[in-house]
Image (cartoon, rainbow, N blue to C red):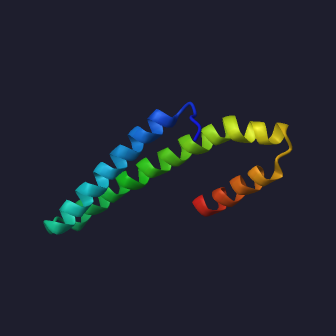
Amino acid sequence: MHGHTHTKAAIDRMARAIGHMGAVKRMLEEGRDCSDVLVQLAAVRAEITNVSKLILKDHLDHCIVDAVREQDEETIARLKGAIDRLL
């Protein structure tokens, strides 16, 4: 395991996303208005997008810089595959 600059921020954002997901579950169980549920789901998506950006930035700043320097084609290919799945 290795740490990066934005690890704490990513963990904090994931905690918020998990909190939002719990709220969505409760809202559905309570039969809340669909519009309210959709707004909460938008909050989940925003948090996950922000976590993805932080992790990608750290990966580019640390791992990929090293991979390019060392001509590590496997690591670069894995990033390309991860970006394809993310998008």
Please state the horizontal and vertical placement of residue 43, each as a whole percent of the image: 35, 51
**Vertically, is 77 above or below 11?**
below
Residue that appears at 61% across and 39% down = 57
In the picture, the quarter occupied by the N terminus is top right
Residue that appears at 54% across and 40% down = 54
In the picture, the quarter occupied by the C terminus is bottom right
Please state the horizontal and vertical placement of residue 15, each as a whole percent of the image: 35, 44
User: In the drawing, does residue 22 fall left or right of residue 78?
Assistant: left
**Vertically, is 37 above or below 49?**
below
- Comparing 13 with 36, the one in front is 13
Residue that appears at 34% across and 59% down = 41
Q: Is residue 31 visible?
A: yes
Residue that appears at 13% across and 66% down = 30
Please state the horizontal and vertical placement of residue 76, each as a whole percent of the image: 76, 51
Number of numbered discs: 0
- Comparing 26 with 2, the one in front is 2
Residue at the farthest right position: 71
User: In the drawing, does residue 58 fall left or right of residue 79?
Assistant: left
User: In the drawing, does residue 23 fall left or right of residue 83?
Assistant: left
Please state the horizontal and vertical placement of residue 67, each as a whole percent of the image: 78, 42
